[in-house]
Amino acid sequence: MNGTMTATGTAAVTLQVALVAAGAPLLAGLMRQVRALLEGRVGPGVTQPWRDLRKLLRKEAVTPAGTGSAFRLGPLVLVATTAVVAALVPLASTATPVSGSADLILVVALLALGTVALALAGLDTGTAFGGMGASREMTVAALVEPTILLAVFALSIPAGSTNLSAIVSGGIHDPVRLASPAGLLSTAALAVAVLAETGRLPVDNPATHLELTMVHEAMVLEYAGPDLALVELGSQMRLTVLLGLLASLSAPWGIATTASPAALVLALVLLALKVALLGAALAAAEVFWAKLRLFRVPELLAGSFLLALLAVTASYFLTGE
């Protein structure tokens, strides 16, 4: 029995990481297609990001003169940390061999490590755009990471643990807590933090190359070929993982809590549907959103931090702590 549970849990981790890696470009293509249709354009198709990655992988890698290991390792660290987060977060199953290590602080630290690695790579180029983008990225990260910690911590108080698998399992067995004031406030705060962490509107525009508005794009202007493909894949995987985390915490129904292969298959299908729906809704909203001015972004993120703080306070009151 234990062998079956271990095999199914290992399969769950492997499949959800593979689903994130293979589905991330498709999610990006779906979001672009939704935006194109709403803007009255035909669009390049859902599989266009995969074709872009294949084209980049065939090109020659170019390393700017004077750069060191930070520039070369940045894309690898970004993809590796995101893959580890995809393995730890209970996207499809809470009964996995790594579920005991899926601690909130560890997951946020891994996300921050990927952000710092890319910021160091931008600084390593020595260009004005790289330094500007790294500075802006770290400013946003300094406001986003505490918000994610507090928002999920508010959900961890009723569960009595900061382990993400325990939080998701508690939400499945006690769905009333998700509709409580603490649950709604934490979901709203986490949603804003996801927008900022992934560089989406209104915090950043992933499709722009205007010098005065770039944040993420400014750090990666010097990348080309396979390195740029890793950066693009890492960013797409991060968006997929964070949307999956948001879906798992706010709507955990369908996530497998046992070692049943049928439950795992159903959980993977529902995961793909929930992330696709969230991505399509985000893309549709971005059509009507304008990018905030840079000095207004901290105000938005401070508001989301306040929502997360209120969620923690409400959670303490509701649990009688």
Image (cartoon, helix red, strand yellow):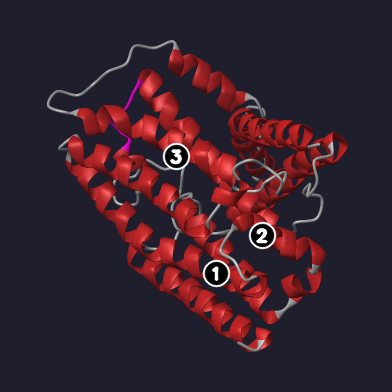
Mark-to-mark CA distance, 3 and 2: 22 Å
Q: Label 1, on which residue?
A: 153
Q: CA distance from mark 3 to mark 1?
A: 21 Å
Does 160 sit above or below residue 114?
below
Find the magenta span and give its range: 220-224
The image's mark for residue 81 is 3
Q: Nearer the viewer, residue 158 or 268?
A: 158
Q: Position of residue 180 (x, y in %)?
A: 72, 78
Question: For residue 170, which numbered disc appears in the image?
Answer: none
Quadrant where the C terminus sits is: bottom right
Residue tagged 2: 166
Disc on the earlier residue, 3 or 1: 3
Determine which quarter of the picture holds residue 56.
top left
Give the tally of numbered discs: 3
- The image quarter containing residue 43 is top right
One can see residue 290 in this view: no
In magenta stretch: residue 13: no
Residue 5's x, y, as percent? 76, 37
* Amino acid type, mark 1: Phe
Front-lying residue, 1 or 225: 1
Q: Is residue 258 left or right of residue 140?
A: right
Residue at coordinates 44% horizontally, 68% vertically from top-left? 301
Q: Is any atom of residue 258 visible in this view?
A: yes
Mark 3 is on which residue type? Thr
